[in-house]
Image: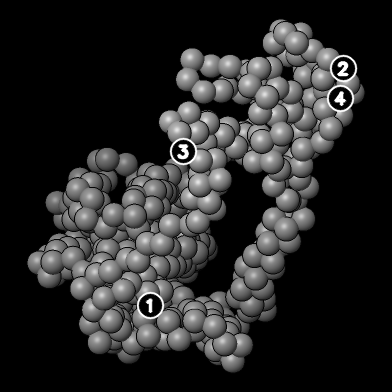
């Protein structure tokens, strides 16, 4: 045990004593805040799309359509150019619209040509860009509302009544007996799901950073023959466990510092007033009362240990980054899958594919962290944790054998070597 702690202390100090570690540690929250500020500034400073409208529908609805299409900061309808306004045929109007939005010589961002359709009205939207989703959405929304109003008026409904109905937003109150109040669902009830998602993404990012640090450390020490010296005074299991513990402490330091930044931001938000800070405090307290922190921490620690062991074993067989990349590739593909499935888990935690993949040990720590706050059955929480625990024991056992075999060998890992390790030949 003493040798294990000495190895972990050596691994930990090797990173936290460097200036680069602390610079990157502090830089990341600053970059995150700066990126959020930059994105908000970009969103508020985006220029409105300048569009012209030509009505060839024969229904005389150009003014009504323009009123619906005009949107401050999103779409600005300008006066229809004379050469476009004088067109009466669709083909000729298309030719003029093409020139108005052309990359060279064009003066508009978009041109809308209204035409009759079998049911209601249709629109031909000429855009200066092929990826103009904003303009397309604005035209679609305006035309949909206009067609709806015309259809209701045709049935005898007063146009003023239609406008009043459209201007009145629907009021939907979400209720659930599982909410904190036993009735209306509040922000506090939704935050635990977000916390679980954040825990899963933090684990994913720390595996990529922390486990990569571990892999590079093992790879460098093997190339410098330092591993052989260390194995002469400590067992492979002690050396592997010490390295994993040391990097885990580095990761814990990162979490504590980031948590400090988050705590200061939360305290500032609480002083400014608003509902978010009290709701977050209530959600965190709720996680403690419900015992969810135990499950989140268990999945977090277990997932980190599992992947760290795999990365350490891989590093012991590599002497160059090129060799490591060929072995890391399949693991990276595995790590991509839960990122996509997490989006489904956020929308519907009980989706069949999400529940099935939750039992796959490589995906369990991510998906169950996101699902735990939604209240899955106890047998799923305990069962997936037990399966992951058994798999971790197997991974650590194989990793220790691979670590010793790889550290003392100059051969590359192949299928024959893997079979030999499993059978005990590499011990």
Q: In the rendered view, would you say 61 is above or below 22?
A: above
Q: In the rendered view, would you say 144 is above or below 393?
A: above
Label 4 residue SS = loop
| Residue 21 lies in quadrant | bottom right
Label 2 residue SS = helix
The residues tagged by marks 1 and 3 sit, at their Cα atoms, a distance apart of: 42 Å
Name the residue that disc number 4 marks: 81
Name the residue that disc number 3 marks: 157
Dot 1 or dot 3: first in sequence order is 3
**Residue at the spot x=57%, y=87% of the render?**
273
Label 4 crowding class (10 Å Cα cut-off): few <14, some 14-19, many 20+?
A: some
Q: Are marks 4 and 2 in contact (CB under 8 Å)?
A: yes
Label 3 residue SS = loop
Residue 405 visible in the snapshot: no
Q: How far across and how far down the image is residue 118, in percent? A: 49, 15
Name the residue that disc number 2 marks: 83
Q: Are marks 1 and 4 in contact (CB under 8 Å)?
A: no
Q: Are marks 1 and 3 in contact (CB under 8 Å)?
A: no
Q: How far across and how far down the image is residue 299, in percent? A: 28, 70
């Amino acid at each position: 045990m003493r040798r294990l702690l000495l190895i972990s202390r050596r691994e930990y100090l090797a990173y936290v004593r460097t200036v680069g570690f602390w610079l990157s540690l502090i830089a990341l929250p600053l970059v995150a805040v700066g990126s959020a500020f930059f994105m908000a500034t970009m969103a508020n400073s985006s220029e409105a799309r300048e569009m012209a409208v030509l009505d060839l529908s024969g229904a005389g609805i150009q003014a009504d359509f323009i009123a619906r299409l005009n949107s401050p900061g999103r779409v600005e309808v300008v006066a229809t150019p004379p050469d476009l306004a004088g067109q009466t045929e669709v083909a000729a109007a298309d030719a003029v619209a093409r020139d108005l939005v052309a990359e060279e010589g064009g003066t508009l961002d978009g041109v809308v040509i209204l035409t009759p359709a079998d049911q209601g009205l249709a629109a031909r939207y000429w855009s200066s860009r092929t990826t103009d989703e904003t303009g397309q959405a604005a035209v679609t929304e305006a035309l949909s509302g206009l067609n709806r109003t015309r259809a209701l008026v045709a049935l005898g409904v007063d146009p003023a009544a239609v406008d009043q109905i459209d201007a009145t937003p629907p009021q939907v109150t979400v209720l659930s007996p599982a909410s904190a109040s036993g009735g209306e669902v509040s922000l506090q009830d939704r935050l635990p799901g977000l916390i679980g998602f954040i825990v899963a993404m933090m684990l994913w990012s720390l595996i990529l950073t922390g486990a990569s640090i571990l892999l590079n450390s093992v790879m460098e020490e093997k190339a410098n023959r330092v591993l052989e010296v260390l194995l002469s005074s400590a067992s492979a299991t002690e050396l592997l466990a010490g390295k994993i513990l040391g990097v885990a402490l580095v990761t814990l330091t990162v979490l504590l510092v980031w948590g400090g930044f988050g705590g200061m931001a939360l305290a500032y938000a609480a002083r400014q007033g608003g509902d978010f800070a009290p709701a977050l405090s209530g959600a965190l307290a709720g996680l403690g009362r419900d015992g969810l922190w135990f499950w989140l921490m268990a999945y977090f620690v277990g997932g980190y240990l599992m992947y760290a062991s795999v990365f350490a074993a891989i590093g012991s067989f590599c002497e160059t980054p090129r060799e490591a990349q060929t072995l890391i590739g399949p693991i990276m593909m595995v790590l991509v899958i839960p990122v996509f499935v997490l989006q489904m888990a956020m929308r519907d935690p009980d989706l069949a594919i999400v529940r099935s993949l939750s039992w796959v040990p490589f995906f369990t720590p991510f998906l169950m962290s996101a699902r735990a706050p939604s209240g899955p059955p106890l047998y799923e929480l305990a069962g997936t944790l037990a399966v992951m625990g058994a798999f971790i024991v197997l991974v650590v056992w194989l990793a220790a054998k691979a670590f010793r075999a790889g550290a003392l060998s100059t051969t590359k890992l192949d299928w024959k070597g893997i079979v030999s390790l499993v059978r005990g030949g590499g011990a």
